[in-house]
Amino acid sequence: MGREEKDYILEKVMVEYGNELVRLAYSYVHDAETAKDLVQNTFIKCYRNLDTFRNDAQMKTWLYRIVINECKDYLKSWNCRMVQVKSFINETTSSILPSAEKTMINQYDNRQLKDTVFSLPKKYREVVYLYYYDSLKTEEIAEVLMISANTVKTRLRRAKQRLESMLEEAELHER
């Protein structure tokens, strides 16, 4: 594969998957700048290994796998342990701005939901994020996480059950 062809492919995947990969990385590391760095490392690895990419997998799932591995390596690193976790990425504003009170309630609800999802064990958090936030199919999630599709379905079901009980419990404490 020539350099021009590799450059073209890299530019295409950066535009097509860049934002999704940053969000995925962020779901692991909870820091926007670190997530961007990890995705940049992913694109470097992608470029270097394009010659060895087997077309038996989709480019998207291959990139997801690289990002997840980058994130896991980072989370095991000494550097990660020394970095304080920052707040979640600010929600994008809608074109119609609701009242300040409603905005605050929505932000609180969104933050509470995110906190609840992120408090799930990693094996459940991964599938919930990939399924609901990145809209991957169970087969794609299975490929990305290297588990069976049935395992993905089971983890999704158990994650939903846990989330329901956690949210109900939180609601009871607020009353």
Image: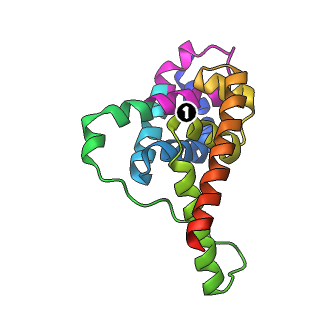
Q: Is residue 48 magenta?
A: yes
Secondary-structure class at tag 1: helix
Q: Write the residue at 50% across / 60% down.
A: 89
Q: Write the residue at 24% across / 46% down.
A: 82
Q: Residue 158: x, y in percent?
A: 66, 37
> Which residues lie in the magenta part?
46-69
Residue 128 shown left or right of residue 80 in the figure: right
Q: Residue 145: x, y in percent?
A: 59, 26
Q: Residue 65: x, y in percent?
A: 55, 27
Residue 14 shown left or right of residue 154 in the figure: left
Which residue is more in the foreground, 29 or 37?
29
Q: Write the residue at 75% across / 33% down.
A: 137
Q: Residue 1: x, y in percent?
A: 57, 16
Residue 114 shown left or right of residue 36 in the figure: right
Q: Is residue 156 magenta?
A: no
- Predominant SS along the magenta part: helix
Q: How many marks?
A: 1
Image quadrant in which you'd find residue 109: bottom right
Q: Write the residue at 58% across / 62% down.
A: 170
Q: Residue type at mark 1: give it.
A: Lys
Image quadrant in which you'd find residue 98: bottom right
Question: Which residue in the structure is indicated by mark 1?
Answer: 123
In the displayed structure, 138 sits above or below 167; it is: above
In the displayed structure, 89 sits above or below 52; it is: below
